[in-house]
Image: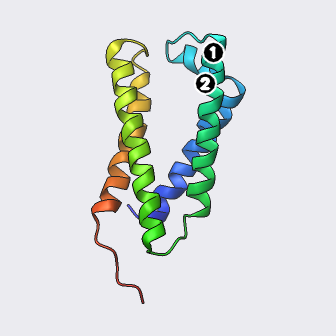
Amino acid sequence: MSYKNIMVIKAAVCLVFGIILISVPGALLSFLGAALSPGGAFTSREYAAALFGNLMLTWFARNAAESDARRAIILALFVYDAIGFVVSLFAVLSGALNPLGWFIVAVYLFFTLGFGYLLMARPRAVQ
């Protein structure tokens, strides 16, 4: 997968989940089998802010040329998604989320593998 493609896909995912989590966090979490307290709603909306930040980063950096900055972006997104994968995996395995939570795990795994691949790929020669 190309750098630009994964950045555009990540931006789209962040847009969808960001809108849902900022507007109706309780509905999404109840769909996933989790109850949401007022503190949890606040935390969900804070997470939505992080998703909107990721959206801006991925969308506006989608055409970035090979550089140290681009590599730093890839590394940051890899770490973000790897942690999200582990946290989501534990949530599903512990029963905090119902089996639909596996979708969240799969999304994080997809991005972790994608950004991990980009980290391991050799940079192309700049012309």
The 10 Å Cα crowd at callout 2, few under 14, some 14 to 19, many 20 or more, is: some
- The image quarter in which residue 87 lies: top left
Q: Is residue 106 visible?
A: no
C-alpha span from label 1 to label 2: 6 Å
Amino acid under label 2?
A: Thr
Label 1 with label 2: CB-CB less than 8 Å: yes
Kindly identify which numbered label has been placed on residue 89: none
The outermost residue toward the right is: 23
Residue at 44%, 31% (x, y): give it. 104
User: Is residue 80 visible to the viewer in this orientation of the structure?
Assistant: yes
Please state the horizontal and vertical placement of residue 11, each as a whole percent of the image. Answer: 57, 50
Q: Provide the residue designation for mark 2.
A: 43
In the image, residue 12 lies at what x, y percent? Answer: 58, 48
Q: Position of residue 116 (x, y in %)?
A: 32, 54
In screen coordinates, is 76 left or right of 49? left
Q: Nearer the viewer, residue 97 or 50?
A: 50
Amino acid at circle 1: Gly
Q: Which residue is mark 1?
A: 39
Using the image, determine if residue 84 lies above or below residue 67: above
The image quadrant where one finds the C terminus is: bottom left
Q: Secondary structure at mark 2?
A: helix
User: Which class describes the residues within 10 Å of circle 1: few (<14), some (14-19), or many (20+)?
Assistant: few
